[in-house]
Every structure is written in C-alpha cells, then in structure tokens.
Image: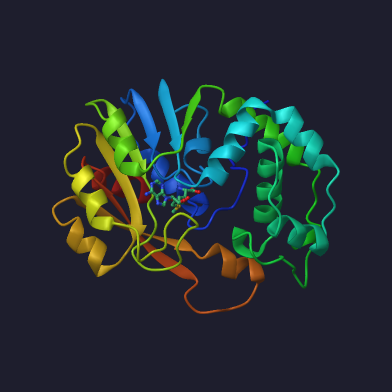
Amino acid sequence: MTIDKKSLINWVGGKRLLRKTIEPLIPKDIKSYIEPFGGGGWILFYKDKWADLEIYNDLDSRLVNLFRIVKYHPNAFKEEFNYLLGSREIFFQFMNSTPITDIQKAVQFYYLITRSFGGKGNTFGTVKCSSGGACKSLKNVPEKIDAIHKRLDKVMIENRDFEKLIKQYDFENAFFYCDPPYSKGCGYEVTSTEDFDHERLREILGNIKGRFLLSYDDSPKVRELYKGFEMIEVERQNGINNRQGDNRLNKVFKELLIANYPIREIHERQTD
Ligand SMILES: C[S@@+](CC[C@H](N)C(=O)[O-])C[C@H]1O[C@@H](n2cnc3c(N)ncnc32)[C@H](O)[C@@H]1O
C-alpha cells in the first residue's frame, strides 16, 4: 500500500497546509533527516523516504507513545480502536481517566485528538453542517494505521528535549527540519508559548555542522533572532477557521521559513 502523504492526526501548528511549499526546499543530498519537533509529523510523512536515517522526536510522550504503538503494535491498536463509538460520554471518560497499558494510552489519545475541536484533545468536537466532528467516519482508520506503520518501519522515534537531540545527531550531512512552538500563540502540553526558550534554540541552530530549515510565525522577535539567515515569507490558510465555514478575519496566517543554506532561489523558482 502506498502512503497517502497524510499524518494520523491534525496537530496544533501542524504543517499540513505548508508541506507542498516546504518539500522542494529540503536538500536532496542529506544523509539523515531529523525532526526535533515532530508533532503530527506532516512533513516527515509527506515523502516515503527523506534519507537513510530518519528521526521523529517530540518532548510530548503521548505523541511518542502513539507513534511507537503504531510502529510496533498496529494490529493491537486497530483491535482496541475498532469497538469505540463516537460519543461525548466516552470522550469525557477518556479525558478524565488514566489508561493502564501503552496500547490503551495510544488509542485514548488518538480518540481525544481526532474527536476534539482543532485537535486539542480537550473540547468535544461537534459541527453544525457536515458529518465531521464526533460522528466522523472511522472506516479509513485501519488503512491510515497500516500506512503510517509501514512508513515508520525504519524511522527512529525519540522523546527528548530538542537540545539533546540536535547535539546527539548533528554532523555535516545531517538535516534538521525544525518546527518549534510559535513565538506567539497557543502552547503545548509540554511547554507553553511563554516557557519555550527560543533563544536556546537559536543558539543551538547557530552552531550546528548540519543544515536546518526552520518554520515559525512571522514576528519581529523571530526576525530579530534569525537576522542574517536566509528567510522567506509564506502564507497559509488558517485551517481551523476555514473548516468551520465562517468568515472570521485572520484566515491567512503569515509564516517564515528560515535556513542556514540557500532557499530563496528555490522558492522563487517554485512560485514563478
Ligand atoms: C508546531 S508543533 C510541530 C508540528 C509538526 N511539524 C506537524 O506537522 O504536526 C511543535 C511541537 O514541539 C513540541 N515541543 C515543545 N517543546 C519541545 C522541546 N523542548 N523539545 C522537543 N519538542 C518540543 C510540542 O510538543 C509540539 O508537538
């Protein structure tokens, strides 16, 4: 089965809508492909293979457990998930309980993320005018699990802070796609926006032997921190608002792509 270039989950800040812009900017001559801020893995899963060594990392152990279970126990996951109904009661039961096994933990996390508004896992997702939200079809879940299971076969899954990870895997042919929490906006379970140390990341990335491509919100702070690096501006639709079908302002979100190798020319060629 060929992977459908999708992830398993919509994750806050996930790069689903930017994957086609990012893909051509990733160098072809890399020996390793590393995502220190893996999240839903939208860029990793966009291609069947980026490099001989591929690493998915995230500090959030719930994500790491989900992908490890899908990698090592896809059938147990499917079996456990198969009997779940789309229900508000189950949603809140999962939100307030502590699963016993890693398989249960992965299934419950997946259920909460896929059944909640905006993939945040904390609000039961209902919609007024389509068959999405909590009554979303489950028919394609086994197929997705099989595709991601296959894709993860040779991917190393790590659960470390970005600094340790980057230092451990850095060498001259290494490539890091970094998608940290934005400088402004909502945070994550493992780190709020205020707590995330953007300066520490800048320090590490400024001293690596390998290459990096970084995606961020377009803010004066980020522009100042990465002054001197190649930077391109891109726009993406705000997926959550659009799904609701309303006309809220701020539908277009501005992001920056920053790298320690030339990306502007490639990007201009793509957009011509
Ligand atoms: C913008 S999201 C990544 C989204 C991902 N690129 C995608 O397409 O789904 C940022 C991720 O960084 C993780 N994170 C936050 N602080 C971290 C840290 N110190 N080290 C590693 N990961 C961290 C969060 O758990 C979150 O999943």
Q: Is residue 201 above or below residue 24?
A: below
Provide residue 51's location: percent of width, then percent of height: 40, 24
Give whichever of 30, 182 is nearer the camera: 182
Give whichever of 39, 27 is nearer the camera: 39
Give whichever of 210, 254 is nearer the camera: 210
Query: In the image, 250: left or right of 213?
Result: right
Provide residue 159's location: percent of width, then percent of height: 45, 38
Residue at the spot 74% in from the left edge and 62% down from the top edge: 92
> Could one spot residue 151 in this view of the protein?
yes
Query: Dividing the picture into quarters, in which one does residue 123 lie?
Result: bottom right
> Could one spot residue 132 in this view of the protein?
no
Query: Dividing the picture into quarters, in which one does residue 140 lie?
Result: top right
Query: Dividing the picture into quarters, in which one does residue 222 lie?
Result: bottom left
Residue at the spot 56% in from the left edge and 28% down from the top edge: 152
Q: Is residue 214 above or below residue 115?
A: above
Residue at the spot 40% in from the left edge and 45% down from the top edge: 22
The colour scheme of the drawn protein is rainbow
Give whichever of 1, 194 is nearer the camera: 194
The quadrant of the image that shows the N terminus is: top right
Q: Is residue 9 above or below residue 242?
A: above
Provide residue 21's location: percent of width, then percent of height: 41, 48
Provide residue 128's location: percent of width, then percent of height: 77, 73
